Amino acid sequence: MAAALRILLLTHSFNGLAQRLFAELAADGHEASVEFDIADSVTEEAVALFAPDVIVAPFLKRAVPESIWRRHLTLIVHPGIVGDRGPSALDWAIQEGEASWGVTVLQAEAEMDAGPVWASREFPLRAASKADVYRNETTTGALAAVREALARVPEWRAGRWQPRPLAQIADARGRLRPSMRQAERALDWARMGSAEILARIRAADGFPGVADALFGQPCHLFDAHPGQRPAGCEDAAPGTLLARRDGALLRATADGAVWIGHVRRADSPHPFKLPATFAFAAEVAEATEAAALSKLPATLMAPAGADPAALGYRELAYRETDDGALGVLSFEFYNGAMSTAQCRHLLAAIGFARGRPTRVLVLDGGAGFWSNGIHLNTIEAAPSPADESWANIEAIDDVCLALLGLSDRITVAALRGNAGAGGCFLALACDRVWAREGVVMNPHYKNMGNLFGSEYWSYLLPRRVGEDAARVIMRNRLPLLARQAAAQGLIDDCFGADRADFAAQVEARARALADDPGLAARIADKARRRAADEAEKPLAAYRAAELDMMRRNFYGFDPSYHVARYHFVLKSPQSWTPRRLARHRELGWRARAASAA
């Protein structure tokens, strides 16, 4: 591990990579603080206040000012292989079908992304969206490369090591490429097959999306998945909308079909991403009534021996082991957001699982995000955001209650991806919570306009960590690594070198639980403890108290939640760095740091 350093994270926003680096570097013993890249003068002030040993820039949208990089060691995390330059690194790599890609840590100089190389990592490039690759392989590679670079800082300062100038790296595969324009992303539905269309939309996922049109209206497309033409649509012209399912629209390509999950309409008063059928609700209703667009039901539990690919895109899926001892309920909601309708669908799926003769039920959430709680985008777009907030929180509370009511089996929350706010407490409604190494949790609500939160957190959190620790966790408002959460007792275990290893271990551990001769006694003890807790204070009382506070958030005189949600959904530019992140801007921080040392 590198010698302890004072590190300023200079970033456009506190995205997933910045959160992971902040938490991991602090856990490594470094003194880390964050400053949002708002203006040159603000950055200069932050550097003067913090006097960092090194500046690490994990996510920027503009060049670091010369007044900074000439005077202070500044390391840029670039999501591309050595030699790659330009702001659309992952976009080009995914759209052009690179077999492997990487991340490079380089020193800031006058030319962007062209400074000396401090460290790099490469990885196989999966057929996945840009956001998914960024949250997983890119983030993992960046952490390893940043750690390697930081370990070299003392040697560099002593003159015993020098970074490699890019011009001297003979095997550098990367090259300078411009920002990818919509002209390079454009879709030709009449000519392009599904693979090419998927690659183009995936390359633009997260931001900026692919400019196109649906129902004759301009929009940007996101969240694409492979699809198959349904019976009777084999001869449909490419570009034709064929069916709808789980908020997505199925569109014909030159050789098949793809699902479009989310869009951003150009003519909408809500200029942010929404489920496709939500954004085009009136057009979908009209096309459905005219029999031009059918609802394609999703199969929750596939028949034995069925090919999962043939079942197509679906947000929910249920499967069992051959002996029926273990059930796995998978849910994949875009960016971890769970709308009122999605919560109700998940509730129905839990009801189905409850009727199955399993002994252990695994809740397998999304690969990128296990869950982030209520769906702020659909709330913002509702006629009454306050009323939709209320409906959404009631719906997710119902899901938690259903899990808590599964007293005849053991439930496991398997966190492949990050979890935030209500999603964290939804996981705690299960008997066991297991997380993949590298998962980041944000078990608090107050960052969203001082939101109080529900999901029975006032019962679930103290039950795991005690009242005092629960208060500390809810006040902290900072990202928490899964291994730290396990050490605090917030979750039960953290394991898995990567997603495949985690999935295999979850299956093996859950199967071991199901086959444990003492399982019946565990289930009986669980039922007794739940009955005792209910007698002491009913779950309904916890829910009522939480919702009383939430009513104030949604309908009270303080508009903080509505303002924060609006800016979050609209991706408003940052105007200042929250003090919980910018510790160098806290009054008296130098004295406290010196005292702690």
Image (cartoon, rainbow, N blue to C red):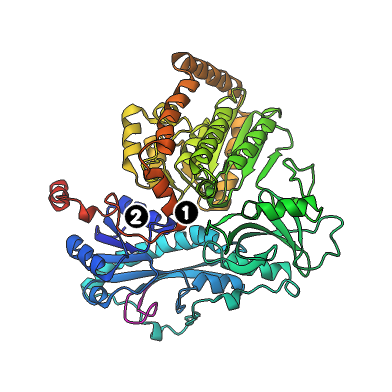
Tell me if I can see residue 506 in this picture: yes
Spot occupied by residue 107 in the image (x, y as percentages of width and height): 33, 74
The mark that comes first in sequence, 2 or 1, is 2
Tell me the quadrant of the picture where the N terminus can be found.
Answer: bottom left
Q: Amino acid at mark 2?
A: Phe
Q: Is residue 112 magenta?
A: yes
Q: Is residue 244 visible?
A: no
User: In which image quadrant can residue 118 be found?
Assistant: bottom left
- Whole-percent x and y of residue 407? 59, 22
Q: Which region is colored magenta?
A: 108-118
Which residue type carries mark 1? Val
- Residue 488, label in figure: none
Q: Is residue 549 above or below residue 366?
A: above
Front-lying residue, 4 or 391 = 391
* Residue occupied by mark 1: 569
State which mark lies toward you, 2 or 1: 1
Q: How many marks?
A: 2
- The answer to which image quadrant residue 319 occupies is top right
Q: Nearer the viewer, residue 348 or 121?
A: 348
> Marks 2/1: CA distance?
23 Å
Residue plotted at (26% across, 66% down): 43
Q: Is residue 477 left or right of residue 246?
A: left
Q: Circle 2 — which element?
A: helix
Q: Is residue 16 left or right of residue 107?
A: right
Q: At x 13% / y 47%, what residue is drawn?
A: 595
Examine the residues drawn in magenta and state their main secondary structure. loop
* Mark 2 burial class by Cα count in 10 Å: few <14, some 14-19, many 20+: many
Disc number for residue 22: 2
**Position above or below: 32 against 372:** below
Q: Is residue 100 left or right of residue 71?
A: right
**Horizontal and vertical percent for residue 316?**
66, 44
